[in-house]
Amino acid sequence: MATGVSTKGTKKTPVLQVRVTYDGKTSEAEVLGAPYAEFQTMKTMNSGGKNTLFYGDNFDALLYMLNNGYKGKITLIYIDPPFSTAANFVNRDQSHAYSDALRGAEYVEYLRKRLIVMRELLSDNGSIYLHLDGNMAFTMKLIMDEIFGERNCRAFITRKKCSTKNYTKNTYGNISDYIMFYTKGSSYVWNRPFSPWGYDKMIEQYPYVDEKTGRRYKKVPIHAPGTRNGETGKEWRGKMPPKGKHWQYTPEKLDEMDAAGEIYWSPTGNPRRMVFCDPAKGIPVQDIWLDYRDSINQAQKTTGYPTEKNFDMLKLIVEASSNPGDMVLDCFAGSGTTLGAAFETGRNWIGVDNSPESIKAIFKRFVTGMEAYGDYVSSHSGVQMSIDIAPKVPFSVQVCDEYKQSYQDMELPTISSTM
Ligand SMILES: C[S@@+](CC[C@H](N)C(=O)[O-])C[C@H]1O[C@@H](n2cnc3c(N)ncnc32)[C@H](O)[C@@H]1O
């Protein structure tokens, strides 16, 4: 793998920012000053707590929040909006859940307006994850750079979303989607995630065993690209760094590392650094996610909502970018996967959706419980479902005027009188 030579310290020319232009692009001031609908509390489940479910258009809900005490209060936002697929999505029982009809600039502006308000809701140490597929991810990356700053893009994650597609004949099977991770600023909540070591992986990545300690290790170079005039460009133990390179550490530090048994000397006298495996810690999670496909096995639970995302993936994101007690927002909540992950890990949540099927799915998740994936078809008959998450989840439901009638007409899953 080639590593570039850092240009740190060399004279920089200013970077010209790329801007996306299209008809109908409104100014940020217009977006933030737009009129919005009010919301009212319609139900309080188990004393409410800080968890809130908004039923209505999320542009209204976001502006309502911004003007009602939530500015700068959200630590983590994850959104999985419609992907601009020009499709309708139906539940597993075939009822209509939502439409994904917006295309081109209309789609970009719809999402951009909401992202501008989300930035205002984020705390200074907050993060936002935007989940999209190849339709719009690359256009929206430019918009995210405009809103949050290119320097605040921390990762562009590729996720394997489903199993291999053997029926795709004329091109490569499409099994990936993308998650952009941005922060509000340079200092942000980050609990680095690790996945457990498998024995084979550990042997593959740390192939050597230190005879003295029995610990597994790998050998890595102790030089880096680029020449230096200081200490790290000089001779150490009678050896100069290879041509065009410098030592990664000062000779003094290299002596210390050697004394601590952290330098491997090859039979020809070449030094390399020994990096030891810490089996308890696991493998740091990288930016290709292969283990978080959506509803893949019979052991998982589902609400039956279309496009329901992998619960473990959301738990990973929530735990990496927030702490217990923090507020997590998903304003394209769908079946409430993010809200469930936030609840299970001790965070507070705010969900927003404008689909009645989404609101029903979220009640299913928090009130009556979900079904095992494999059982869904046979047991979907209104019979009491298995409880997946403790039913005593406290939350309140806020509904905007325009949606009140639809809320009242909704048959919400319930197991007790929890008004
Ligand atoms: C892809 S789904 C989210 C699925 C969710 N991540 C899950 O795990 O279940 C997108 C959701 O956004 C909602 N949505 C789309 N436009 C909206 C809007 N303007 N206001 C509120 N919700 C909206 C849809 O109703 C749908 O539930």
Image (tube, helix red, strand yellow):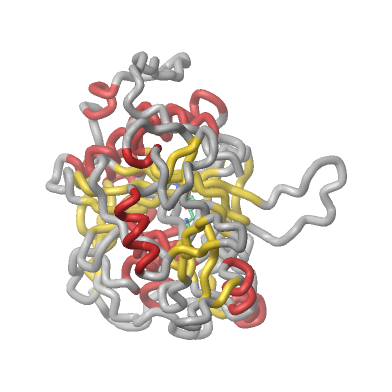
Regarding residue 230, the answer to whether it shows in the image is: yes
Residue at 39% in and 30% down = 145
| Residue 271 against residue 65 in the figure, above or below | below
Q: Position of residue 32 (x, y in %)?
A: 23, 29
| Residue 100 against residue 229 in the figure, above or below | below
- Looking at the rendering, which quadrant does residue 349 occupy? bottom left
Question: Is 173 on the left or on the right of 56, as rendered?
Answer: right
**In the rendered image, which quarter contains the C terminus?**
bottom left
| Residue 331 against residue 67 in the figure, above or below | below
The one nearer the camera, 355 or 131, is 131
Q: Where is residue 50 in the image (x, y as percent from the top left)?
A: 19, 64
Q: Position of residue 122 (x, y in %)?
A: 24, 45
**In the rendered image, which quarter contains the N terminus?**
top right
Task: State the residue lying farthest toward the left.
Answer: 69
Q: Position of residue 230 (x, y in %)?
A: 32, 35
Regarding residue 81, the answer to whether it shows in the image is: no
Residue at 49% in and 77% down = 370
- Looking at the rendering, which quadrant does residue 59 occupy? top left
Residue at 24% in and 58% down = 327
Q: How many marks?
A: 0
The one nearer the camera, 149 or 246, is 246
Question: Is 314 on the left or on the right of 162, as rendered?
Answer: left
Task: State the residue lying farthest toward the right.
Answer: 169
The one nearer the camera, 258 or 173, is 258
Question: Is 406 on the left or on the right of 41, as rendered?
Answer: right
Residue at 44% in and 62% down = 314
